[in-house]
Structure formats: C-alpha cells, structure tokens
Amino acid sequence: MDQNKEDRNKGHQSNQPFGKPPAWNRYLARVGDRPPTPLAHAALAALRARHAPSREAVILDLGCGNGRDSQLFIDAGYTVVGIDKTREAIDAACSALPEHFRGIVTAIEDSLAQPEWRQPVLVHASFVLPFLMEADFRQVFDAMRGAAGRGALLSYHLLGPRDDWAARDVRVWSREEVKRLNSGLKFHSHDETENDSETVVGALKHWHVHEIVAFDARPMASL
Ligand SMILES: C[S@@+](CC[C@H](N)C(=O)[O-])C[C@H]1O[C@@H](n2cnc3c(N)ncnc32)[C@H](O)[C@@H]1O
C-alpha cells in the first residue's frame, strides 16, 4: 500500500473521518426538492423484476436524508424504513412521506439488530457508506451481505481513488477493490463515473463514484 493511502486509512480509522464530522444539517437545508438519485432509479428497475411492488415488501434506506429516494420507492408501491442519525433528516422525511415510511433516528452501525434488517427486499445506501468509520463500514457491509443472502437486492455508492474527498480520509475503492468487496455477489450493474460538479452545499469538486446494484445469486435452498 502506498504511504498516502496508508495514512488515509489510518485517518479513516480514527474518529474524525472528515477532519471534523460532516455538517449534515447544512446538507439537509440545501438538498431541498432535488430528484431521486440515478442509483435509486437503477435499484427500482432491478427490484421490480424480483419483487412485485407490495406494501408488505420493506426497503431499508440507510442514511436516507430527507427521503428523496424513499419517495421514489414509496411511489412505486413499496414500504420504506429510513435510518439516519440526524434527527432533522428523519423529521423532514417523515413530514414529506406521511404514509408507508417509518423513520428511525440512529447510526446505521447501531441499527443492525433491528427487526427491519431480517427480510428487506432492498438495502439502499445512497452517498452514505463512504462516511462510515472503517470498522463500522465492515459491520454494515456484512449485514448488507447477510440481507442479500436472504434475498435482498443491494444498491449503494462508494467513492473511487480520484475523488477529491480521497484526500480527506474518506475511504475510496478502486474497481478491483470493489470487485473483491463484492466477491460472492453478482453485479446487476456497476457504473463508475467521474465528473467535476458542485456538491449539494455548493463546493466544486471532482467526483469519482461507483454506483452499484448487486445481489446474491446463490439459490435460497443452499443457504
Ligand atoms: C450525503 S447525505 C445522503 C442522503 C440521502 N441518502 C441522499 O442521497 O439524498 C448522508 C446522510 O447520511 C446520514 N449519515 C451519515 N453517517 C451516518 C451514520 N453513520 N448512520 C446514519 N446516518 C448517517 C447523514 O445524516 C445524512 O442525512
């Protein structure tokens, strides 16, 4: 591992992944009525082919923010449980989504024993996994794999090594590392994109993003 990467990973294991904790309230104040993410659309297209929409079918939206992706899933006919550690995020999502949405204010890494993890049809994590501490990420990703083994689809973003935030102790993943992380799972899609554009809070940055929809292809009978 090169020295820069080693230093970054050390930093990431500390308690300050972003130098200081990201200001989620500022993000939430500005995200407004932005449309659902392309990842949510990709997840929904893949999900529809596996689980016909039903209010019995639960989608877990990890780090749901103001619920812009949850809204898409609810409009498609599913029920969503949103998990976010920022109370204002869950309050905004609950007031935008009065029906078929339940919000839980907690860190994702502290939610793994919740019954909602037992049988979701989709575990969706839009722009949140890069902000977890290394150990928390491992625990959360293991729980996502466990859910995939019980039939859930997974959709999530990771950041690539050329993303500007790689310099801020955010964990980044090369294409090879993403493949290794997902060994045993199958990609429904894995799009890797790069562009220069503004963050929600208006800062120009270079984005290098992995957008992943994956599933466990083993027959349920062999589990
Ligand atoms: C960049 S925003 C993304 C919000 C939403 N998924 C979207 O794409 O619009 C990250 C969200 O994750 C939440 N978050 C960050 N770390 C978290 C953690 N460890 N557990 C739960 N929520 C977390 C923040 O409060 C914030 O609402």
Image: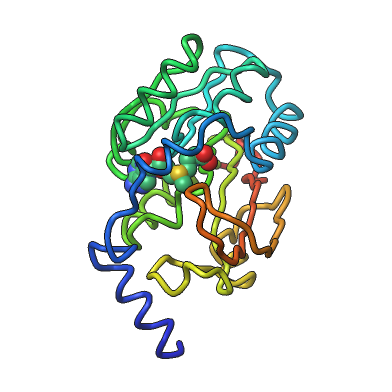
| Residue 96 spot, x, y in % from top left | 48, 17
Residue 54 shows up from this direction:
yes
- Taking the image as four quarters, which one is ligand 1 found in? top left
Outermost residue to the left:
15
Residue 147 shows up from this direction:
no
Residue at 45% across / 90% down in the picture?
Answer: 2
Query: Does residue 159 lie above or below 145 as drawn?
Result: below
The quarter of the displayed image where residue 152 is located = top right
| Residue 107 spot, x, y in % from top left | 30, 41
Color scheme of the displayed model: rainbow
| Residue 66 spot, x, y in % from top left | 46, 30
| Residue 1 spot, x, y in % from top left | 45, 87
* Quadrant of the snapshot with the C terminus: top right
Residue at 38% across / 83% down in the picture?
Answer: 6
Q: Please state which of residues 92 and 136 is positioned toward the viewer in this rendering.
A: 92
Residue at 39% across / 70% down in the picture?
Answer: 168
Query: Does residue 119 lie above or below 55 as drawn?
Result: below
Residue at 55% across / 68% down in the picture?
Answer: 163
